Image (cartoon, rainbow, N blue to C red):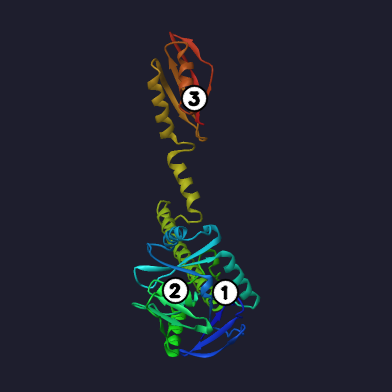
Amino acid sequence: MTLMIFLPSGDRPFRWMRIADAAVADEGEGVPPIVEGEAVVAIPPADAVTLHWAELPDRSAAQAVAAARLVVAEASATPLGELHVAVGDEGVANRPIGVVAAGSMREWLAQLAAAGVDPDVMIPAPMLLPRPEDGYVRARPAGEAVVRGADLGFADEARLTALVTGDEEPVDMTRDALTSALVAATASPALDLRQGMFARRRQLALDWALIRRLAALAAAILLVTLAIDLVTITKYSFGADAVAARADALAASGLARGETVTDVDRQLTERLSGVRGPGAGFTTTAAAVYAVVRTVPGVELTGIDFSPNGSMRLSVAAERESLPTDFKRALEAAGFTVTAGVFSAAGGRVTGEMTVARS
């Protein structure tokens, strides 16, 4: 259903029509109660809205309105800041432009709001009539006489109408034709004044059913994600256990045959220490010491004793008094802790002992 509310003008009060099933179901004066779910269309009086037609860009509503304001500025003596300009579309090159005082729009919307009405659209009265291919048509929707041409729309006043139409008399629409026109105009308005700053504000309604479905979907996604994580963690845990068991088996193969396995890491460390000797081991320590000996010409080792604590006692012979000190510094630079004994000179050689250990 559609409720049409014709706004007052002069001594004319509010009037209304209710359209249902492509027919006028009821009509009267004043503002009736709004039936839930019905569309509300407000009809400003024809003499309060000036209509123009012009070719306008159709790329965007903003461009069309901007171009329409230029057209209106050339045709109106009223400052643009005091006017409300709306643009429509009838499917032809020339598009309708509605011009109304901004103050009138505010007053109409305030009157409707006081009556508990917030109209969905506002259609100027002449735009309720169909666009004729040629000539003019005339009708009296809700008692207000209006005339419509292809690119004209205005209130029907004897002198004005004759001046505009000349010798061509407007064709009066039948009641059935007017009803059909009202049904078509309210179903698909060619021009709606509720644009720009007067556009209807949309009320945000919460769809609780949708919210519940979304919440259930989010919970399902979280549960699936958690299940995937648990499966992944379990898989990694089993994999880690398998790798650890394999590593233990491989490590156990490095122990002495028949040795009871209690702590593979500690047992391998003990065996490695037994094989290579304590500390860094004899081989590693001796190799490092001999590498240092090669860097200090005139120094030679006359004896080596590897101790159970991992240190190595060196018997050193040098050609000069300063060489043992150079050798000691070279060992320290190589990362050894060096304890030097007393060196003595005899037979042109300097001899003594040093104890070295890895720092």
Residue that numbered label 1 is attached to: 206
Tell me how far mark 2 sits from mark 1, CA to CA: 42 Å
Mark 1 residue type: Leu
Q: Residue 189 placed where, x, y %?
A: 45, 76
Q: Evaluate whether residue 156 shows in this view.
A: no
Residues marked 2 and 3 touching at CB (< 8 Å): no
Q: Nearer the viewer, mark 2 or mark 1?
A: 2
Q: Earlier in the sequence, mark 2 or mark 1?
A: 2
Residue pictured at 56% horizontal, 80% vertical: 5
Q: Secondary structure at mark 1?
A: loop
Q: Is residue 350 above or below residue 246?
A: above
Q: Nearer the viewer, mark 3 or mark 1?
A: 1
Q: Residue 134 placed where, x, y %?
A: 34, 77
Residue pictured at 45% horizontal, 14% vertical: 323
Q: Earlier in the sequence, mark 2 or mark 3?
A: 2
Residue that numbered label 3 is attached to: 332
Q: Residues within 10 Å of mark 1 (few under 14, many from 20)?
A: few
Residues marked 2 and 1 touching at CB (< 8 Å): no
Residue that numbered label 2 is attached to: 153
Q: Residue 52 placed where, x, y %?
A: 43, 67
Mark 2 residue type: Gly
Q: Nearer the viewer, residue 232 or 127?
A: 127
Q: Nearer the viewer, mark 2 or mark 3?
A: 2
Q: Earlier in the sequence, mark 3 or mark 1?
A: 1
Q: Residues within 10 Å of mark 3 (few under 14, many from 20)?
A: some
Q: Nearer the viewer, residue 243 or 205?
A: 205
Q: Secondary structure at mark 2?
A: strand
